[in-house]
Amino acid sequence: MRILIYGAGMRVEPWLADLRAALPTADVAEWTPGAAPADYAIVWAPPQQLIDEQPGLRAIFNLGAGVDPVMKLRLPAGLPVVRMEDAGMAVQMAEYVCHALIRHFRELDGYEHDMRARRWGVRKPRERKDWPVGILGLGVLGQRVARAVASFEFPVRGWSRTPRVMDGVECFAGPDQLDAFLAGTRVLVCLLPLTADTADILNRRTLGRLLPGAYLINIARGAHLVDDDLLALLDSGHMAGATLDVFRTEPLPLDHPFWGDARITLTPHGAARTLREASVTQIVGKLVALERGEPVAGVVDPTRGY
Ligand code: NAP
Ligand code: GLV
């Protein structure tokens, strides 16, 4: 069995070493143009050339939860694309969202500013009931985040494509229930996959339906957000701020207005990192199952795009 690995912007050597250790009888190599035919490819943001040069692939494993960089390519019909499911990312997302939420809700930036100015004074406590948190996407990561947020006793609501039932979470589904979901949300967390249906979903109309003084946490993809619409809603005072981990162009161009905007906290697409050990274990487990002809979870449905 021959396996190729390619990761845009990644150092593949440690991955090669771990995969070779886990699959000692396999021929595991880095993909470079013209590489010999392989049975499987393990990729992050591969070029079209890799797909075109490897017509014999039996499956592609995506080194991340979001498969948008693969699904935008021309893929042979029927080629399974297998995504990463959790593999240590869900708890990182829970940490990230709880940090951003509590930092904003408890006005910790304001306190830091005051204390640096040697100003002593507590602020009026806010009531959790006035701060419902809405999570767009109740999948592997969204559900973990919903549980973590609920443990701090915030009201939690979630929106998915198909109806879901989750203890302690008010669930909404489909385009018909989006407005009702938004209308009762003050802190909006985006954990949707990027598909034709979800691109630009964070826009003037949808963000404008949130409760006044809303706060956005986007940790899914930059193309979910219409940047200028967020800036306009911040300027109008409808939105109080945002924490953004993902951007339309990454790295964020140096002349982008998000840089230096005190209302926006930025991180460099690191809310949940792909962890090598957990990822190799998951990929190897699924690859061995596929070789045995067994079904595996996390296979992308090309009609849904995720
Ligand atoms: P997932 O398990 O596939 O969950 C996706 C959720 O979104 C599901 O609940 C799905 O609904 C919902 N959804 C999809 N399309 C929808 C639509 N048109 N309308 C309403 N709901 C829709 O994905 P995941 O593992 O949680 O990952 C989510 C995303 O996080 C990834 O795609 C990736 O872009 C992003 N991510 C970012 C980072 C980072 O570091 N910033 C790291 C990892 C992942 P159903 O439940 O009905 O299917
Ligand atoms: C990272 O962005 C991922 O999709 O895993």
Image (spheres, rainbow, N blue to C red):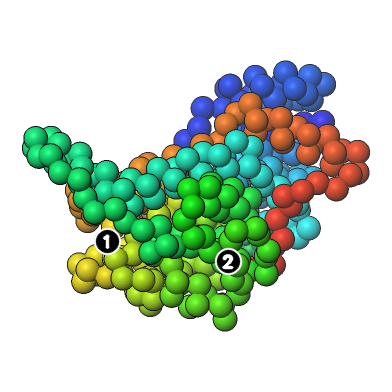
State the image coordinates of residue 271 (x, y, percent, origin top left).
45, 42
Q: Is 21 left, or right, of 96 in this rendering?
A: right
* Disc on res. 170: 2
Q: Amino acid at mark 1?
A: Ala
From the Cβ of disc 1, is ligand 1 less than 8 Å away? no
Ligand 1 - quadrant of the structure image: bottom right
* Disc on res. 104: none
Q: Is 275 left, or right, of 232 in this rendering?
A: right
Viewport quadrant of the C terminus: bottom right
Q: Residue at x 50, y 72 (%)?
A: 181
Viewport quadrant of the N terminus: top right
State the image coordinates of residue 238 (x, y, percent, origin top left).
27, 70
Measure the C-alpha gap from mark 2 to mark 1.
24 Å
Disc 2 residue crowd, few under 14, some 14–19, many 20+, Cα 10 Å: some
Q: Amino acid at mark 2?
A: Glu
* Disc on res. 240: 1
Along the line of sight, which residue is nearer the eye, 208 or 84? 208
State the image coordinates of residue 82 (x, y, percent, origin top left).
71, 47
State which mark lies toward you, 2 or 1. 2
The quadrant where residue 33 appears: top right
